[in-house]
Image: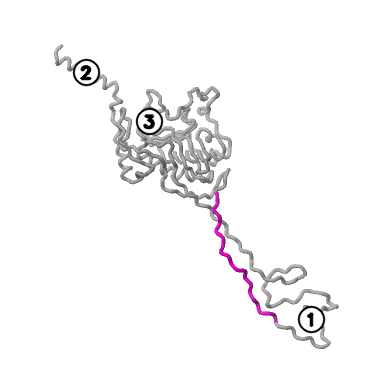
Amino acid sequence: MTRGVALSLVGSLVLVALAGCGRWIEQREPWRHDAEVECLQSGAVREGPAVTLMSPIEGPGICGADFPLRVAALAGSAALGFADDPRPPGMIPQPPFPPYPAQAPISPQYPPPPPLAPPRLGAPIPLGAGGSDPAAGAGPPPPDPYAYPSPRVGGGVQQPWAPPARVSPPRAPALIASGPAAVVPAATLACPLVSALDQWVADAVQPAAQRWFGRPVIEIKQISAYSCRSMNGQRGAPISEHAFGNALDLAAFTLADGRRVTVKDGWRGPPEERGFLRDVHAAACRQFSTVLAPGSNAFHYDHIHVDLARHASGRGICNPPAIPGDAVAGREPLFTGSTRAGRSGRSATGFAPAVPGED
């Protein structure tokens, strides 16, 4: 075998091998790089104690991000939620109303009434001057033109004047400050998703928490951020948005009073937890291009998945359909067989229970 033939054969084998693993030499879509750069240049996400810029993630294959961020908290700027519609079980705490300044009792001095003229001889003694008229009997004294108007009680006796009781104006609903919500564990994400998550937490999650519980969220538990894998961890499935730091799975929300609302138990739990989770889910469907929650399939029975994928149809995915919290909190939860697990540990569909971080 000549040298030229040998080199040609080797080259052919290399091409065949590369073709067989072409998906591993495929390049990331250019829009992902452009979206990261645009996000960072816009200032929507800034570095700080809770957000740090990491080294680029290159592979394996097309996995990775050019400017990944390590995120330890979301919605770092304080947000105010107008607590005008508290929900059970807790009322929103009200700060003590400031007292009015102390005032000395008012004791106005009115001029004394003029002295009565002495009665003429033979004239009847006027009523109210210490005598009585036997013919007319006892009666109320004549009105005193110098008396301050006040109620009369018992026998028409004029009561001394007293200042009216001060009535406090009604209290206005309280404004409750919401600080950042910690992300546990810290998540590796691309800038566009961090920006969307910041806005969602500040504008939807915190107001919903204050509305239903009277407390802000101080911690969000995530179970999958950047992860180089296919969708739902299934062999042969398309690559997941998690592989680009463009997706996050949220499993629980911890409130300022220590209460923990999990997606797994709260989706069909107490009314206020159902209402809260449905409200944040509905808001997520307006904020992200893909939202999957309990009821979408067996893999999402215990978390809410959000991402910013660019779908070929140009339409977003919201599964299950969004329902306002008020609607679901006032009735029994809807049954969705795909997310109920049996005693054997398998879901009603026969799938094995979802493993956190593998969907």
Q: Which residues are magenta?
A: 93-113
Look at the numbered disc 1 and give the secondary structure of its residue: loop
On the image, the x and y values in percent for residue 312 come to 36, 33
Query: What is the quadrant of the N terminus in the image?
Result: top left
Query: What is the quadrant of the C terminus in the image?
Result: top left
Look at the numbered disc 2 and give the secondary structure of its residue: helix
Which is in the foreground here, disc 3 or disc 1? Answer: 3
Q: Is residue 93 above or below residue 273?
A: below
Q: Are marks 2 and 3 in contact (CB under 8 Å)?
A: no
Say which mark, if any, is on residue 94: none
Whether residue 316 is visible: no
Q: Three-letter amino acid code at disc 2?
A: Ser
On the image, the x and y values in percent for residue 101 come to 56, 64
The residue that label 2 is drawn on is 12
The residue that label 3 is drawn on is 227
On the image, the x and y values in percent for residue 351 come to 48, 23
Residue shown at 47% from the left, 44% from the top: 206
The residue that label 1 is drawn on is 126
Q: Quadrant of residue 135 in the image? A: bottom right
Determine crowd level at label 3: few under 14, some 14-19, many 20+ residues with C-alpha closer than 10 A. many
Which of pointers 2 and 3 lies earlier in the amino acid sequence? Answer: 2
